[in-house]
Image (cartoon, helix red, strand yellow):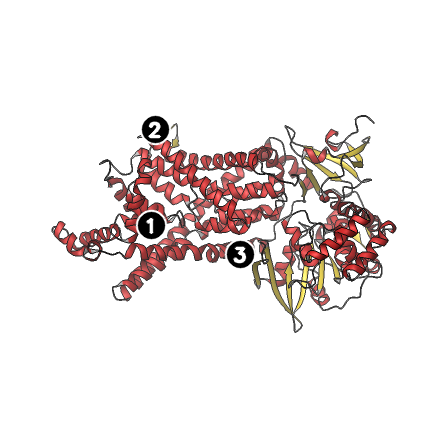
Amino acid sequence: MRKIALFGNPNVGKSSIFNLLTGLRQKVGNYPGMTVERKTGTLTFEGKKYEIIDLPGTYGIYPNSLDEQIVTNILNNPQHSQYPDLGVVISDPSNLKRSLLLLQQVRDLGIPCIFVINMMDEAEKMGITIDQKKMEELLETKVILTDVRHEMGFEELKQAFSLELEESESPYRVPKEFALAVEETIEALNAENSYKAWQLLSQKELDYLADEQIKEIESIRRKYQIIPRRLQVKEILRRYQTIDEILSKTVFQLEPKKNPVTEKLDQILMHPVAGYVIFFGLLLVIFQAIFAWAGPFMDGIDEGFAWLGQRIGSLLPEGPLNSFLTDGVIAGIGGIVIFVPQIAILFFFISLMEESGYMSRVVYLMDRWLKPFGLSGKSAVPLMSGAACAIPAVMSARNIENDKERLITMLVTPFMTCSARLPIYIVIIGLIIPDARFMGFQLQGIALFGMYILGILGALGSAWVLKKIIKTNFKSYLILELPTYKIPVWRNVLITVWEKSKGFLIGAGKIILAMSIILWVLGSFGIGEKFNNAEEIVAQKHPELSKEEFENEVTAHKLEYSFLGYMGQALEPIIKPLGYDWKMGIGLISSFAAREVFVGTMATVYSLGDTDNEMTIRERMANEINPNTGKPAYSFATGMSLLIFYAFAMQCMSTIAIVRKETGSWKWTIIQLVFMTGFAYLASLIVYQLLK
Amino acid sequence: MANPLTIFDLKVGESGRISGFTSQDVPMKLYELGLIPGTFITLKKRMLFGGPVCIQISNSASQIALRSTEANAILIEKLLVE
């Protein structure tokens, strides 16, 4: 299959073109050994099949971030599985200069390239005309004008995919003073052309080379006193000179560019005061929407799975298989699917903010306030997404250039109140906070809001601590392009929502499902007489029970003497100072897989067959007596202690897995786990001992 | 000049021509974005409390946000606004 790679600066509509070419025939994976998302898709046109590769947005081939490093690695290594047969460099009319820099660099590395000018509808508005023929002549390649909104120019683009282009006749000319060094590099390392040799001398990261080759390059650098950075600067300055010449002959502008809509919007949205008011107002609307809109869907899913469980339960004969399918598998899958509406809605808004260009403004607004905590304005996006789910949020930290800021962002994002904490908060707040109003505000609502604030404080506080500890060699900076506002392309928004939801279902779902099954096994089996003869023991103790009550009592008894029950009891001495009993211990152990498991587990522990009726769980929990104190198990002190514990503790295996993957380090993953859970333990201990 | 001007010294609405950098070590991204000596820029916005500034390269529709440290690293010659 012919490989076509899409290159381009951020914000030129590269993903729109990729989405339009491939539709849902997309595959999202990871680069081997790296965690940068790899997007590929297929296209069949006029009987030929193409593999389209959507590379991360980049300004040039000298990498500033992990995303850009990927592009450089592929370009410099023809053995790479993603090395393209044809490059498509995508640009937009307002930033042709930068895109031509990228085009020249990619082409000089020996990859034939065509040039696409996207967003041509904007060009008309800005009064820009482009002499396409002249540009093709000067660039010595095909130039295609496209417009995603009206699907203009795509036939021509697809046709161009089969072109066999000749190499440019005017490649990068190495400055005279470096001619000797370049020649020596060509000989010593068998570089194909002088620009490849130049790359070997000017790139800082050359991981794909053998050690001896790197030594060779270093000795040449020493001999000619070459500093890679100076070469890079020199190259860019030289290229911009010729690019200016090309542009002056091909691009004509009637009036100075102005974007009245963007300027007017920015006067409000980036205002030093009003900008923040609008941003926080918008956040409020988004969270309202997440809860209000997702509610009916979540109820529907909950009921749907309960119904499915009952149907299957009644179809199959009673026994371990029946219980495994209904309590283990179906309940497990239901517990994953239920979060999809919230995740979909959150990403709908995030994608809207990104598509419209507002997200860059958020980065601009937040940078000043996040910087003192060792974060960057770009951390605002992961932190916000963390309010839905830490897993996609940690992944979205990738475009932070500075390694220290990126690491801190990933380490503190799990403190943000994710949607999995919500069921626990709702149940416990319902138990310990009275359903009353104070100064017109609902008390329970204030408590929930307080938990969100606590999450933010946890994240910022630990970021501040980490800032003092982590060292870096890289300078932190913020250089951010603020694109003009655009009406979102709905196809892109929908594809993002689809992809993130699917990614969550499959990625996190696997772990949650596996954990539910393990829990079912641990909770359903046990050894010893007390477990095996549960029916008889219960019948002896409580002969007066009705059939249903009897069955519930047996379930509770079995659980107490199951493997899981023993684990909970083993944990009891450690959690007793926090005000918990062994039953909550089981909840803590099982919800280590994922926090939302807590409510379901407590339902099983308190011998309730189904979890879909939250009120009955709540009532049952309210009546529960702590065997250690003889007082209600969910007193105000214990409830607060549990809330604090779940606010801070790293109770999520999926997040641990994703942090390990994204940081590439067990050290930081374990530090995070110990720090979060240790801190949660201490905070809960203090809270319980004070309130008791 | 004893105290050369940087982008950070501009007032909102003022323009200047980039004349160089205070150090050899400024991020490559500045060059790639076209913030190179000779480029005309206008300061469009500035946040309170030393927050980032927002500049526009002449003839470009989009703007670029810079932290105070980056803005302070870019030397300029001031131009009078007409």
SS category of the residue bearing label 1 = helix
- The crowding category of the residue bearing disc 2, from other C-alpha atoms within 10 Å (few below 14, some 14 to 19, many at least 20), is few
Estimate the x, y position of residue A55 in percent, counting from the top left.
65, 56
- Name the amino acid type tagged 2: Leu
Label 1 vs label 3: CA separation?
28 Å
SS category of the residue bearing label 3 = helix
Disc 1 marks which residue?
A: A600
Disc 2 marks which residue?
A: A690
Location of the N terminus of chain A (image quadrant): bottom right
Q: Chain of mark 1?
A: A
Label 3 vs label 2: CA separation?
46 Å
- Name the amino acid type tagged 1: Gly
Q: Chain of mark 3?
A: A
The residue sitting at 43% across, 34% down in the picture is: A450
Q: Is residue A461 above or below residue A195?
A: above
Numbered mark located on residue A40 in the image: none
Task: Give a yes or no on whether discs 1 and 3 share a subunit.
Answer: yes
Q: Are marks 1 and 2 in contact (CB under 8 Å)?
A: no
Q: Is residue A110 above or below residue A562?
A: below
